[in-house]
Image (cartoon, rainbow, N blue to C red):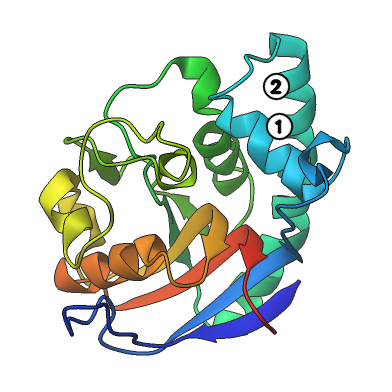
C-alpha cells in the first residue's frame, strides 16, 4: 500500500476543488497502456471489470473479481484505520457518474460494503452519498461516450448528490476505485464531505495514476 498527500489545486477558473491537505492511500499504481486491463488479477483488470460498462461480464467473472477486491480491502483497510489513530471510521464510496446503473455495475460499492461490515472499527456508510443528477463519465468522455451531464467543476458533488445527515461530525474513510491526478473528482468529493460537516476525511483508492 502506498501513501500520498492530496493537496489543493486550482482549475482554469482559479477555483479550489479542495481547501485543505488530506492524507491518502492506494494499493497499486494503475497503467492505462499496453492492454494491462486484460491481465487477470491485475489492478487494472479488477477496476475495469467491476466498472462493467463496455463489455458485459458474466456473473461468475464479476463475483471472482469481487473476491479479489475483497482480499485487497481486507489487507489494506485495517492498516488505514490503525494509521488514522481513530477508534472507528465511516466508510463511504465516491458515487459513480450516473444516477442509474444495473446491479452488475455496482459490484465495487457492494464489495466495499461487505468488507466494511466485516472489519472491526469500520462502519458501513456506502449509501451515505448518492448521485441524484447525472454527470459525465470522465474515463469514457475522452472517446466521446461520457453521456449526459457536466465534466468535473468545483462543487459538482454537492450539486449532484444527496448526503446523509449521519456524516456530520464523523471521521470518514472515502474510497474510490481509481484516483487520477488532475481530474479532481475525488478532491471535490472530499471537499463536499467537509462542507457537509465531516470531522475528518481519509482517502483510499484501489489504483492510482499519479507521479510518485
Q: Quadrant of the N terminus?
A: bottom right
**Which structural element holds mark 1?**
helix
**Left or right: 174, with 210 as reference point:** left
Residue 93: x and y in percent read 43, 50
**Which structural element holds mark 2?**
helix
Residue 177: x and y in percent read 57, 50
Q: Is residue 90 visible?
A: yes
Q: Residue at x 23, y 74 (%)?
A: 194
Tell me: residue 118, above or below residue 100: below
Tell me: residue 93, above or below residue 107: below
Tell me where residue 133 sits by quadrant: top left
User: Pointer 2: residues within 10 angstroms few (<14), some, or many (20+)?
Assistant: many
Q: Nearer the viewer, residue 180 or 3?
A: 180
Q: Is residue 121 visible?
A: no
**Left or right: 86, with 133 as reference point:** right
Tell me: residue 94, above or below residue 102: below
Q: Nearer the viewer, residue 141 or 79?
A: 141
Residue 117: x and y in percent read 55, 43
Q: Nearer the viewer, residue 165 or 4?
A: 4
Q: Residue at x 26, y 72 (%)?
A: 191
Q: Are marks 1 and 2 in contact (CB under 8 Å)?
A: yes
Q: Quadrant of the C terminus?
A: bottom right
Tell me where residue 84 sits by quadrant: bottom right
Residue 28: x and y in percent read 76, 63
**Left or right: 152, with 112 as reference point:** left
Say which residue label 2 marks: 62
Tell me where residue 154 sits by quadrant: bottom left
Say which residue label 1 marks: 66
Amino acid at each position: 500500500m502506498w501513501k500520498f498527500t492530496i493537496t489543493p489545486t486550482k482549475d482554469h477558473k482559479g477555483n479550489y476543488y479542495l481547501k485543505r491537505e488530506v492524507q491518502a492511500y492506494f494499493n497499486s499504481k494503475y497503467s492505462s497502456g499496453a492492454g494491462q486491463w486484460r491481465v487477470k488479477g491485475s489492478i487494472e483488470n479488477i477496476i475495469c471489470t467491476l466498472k462493467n460498462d463496455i463489455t458485459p461480464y458474466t456473473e461468475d467473472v464479476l463475483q471472482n473479481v469481487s473476491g479479489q477486491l475483497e482480499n485487497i480491502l481486507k489487507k489494506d483497510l485495517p492498516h488505514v484505520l490503525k494509521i488514522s489513530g481513530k477508534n472507528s471510521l465511516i466508510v463511504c464510496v465516491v458515487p459513480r457518474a450516473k444516477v442509474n446503473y444495473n446491479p452488475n455495475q455496482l459490484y465495487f460499492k457492494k464489495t466495499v460494503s461487505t468488507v466494511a461490515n466485516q472489519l472491526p472499527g469500520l462502519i458501513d456508510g456506502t449509501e451515505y452519498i448518492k448521485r441524484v443528477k447525472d454527470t459525465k463519465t470522465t474515463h469514457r468522455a475522452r472517446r466521446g461516450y461520457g453521456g449526459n451531464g457536466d465534466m468535473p467543476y468545483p462543487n459538482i458533488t454537492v450539486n449532484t448528490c444527496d448526503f446523509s445527515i449521519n456524516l456530520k461530525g464523523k471521521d470518514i474513510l472515502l474510497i474510490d476505485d481509481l484516483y487520477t491526478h488532475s481530474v479532481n473528482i475525488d478532491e471535490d468529493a472530499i471537499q463536499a464531505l467537509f462542507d457537509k460537516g465531516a470531522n475528518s476525511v481519509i482517502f483510499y483508492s484501489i489504483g492510482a495514476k499519479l507521479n510518485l
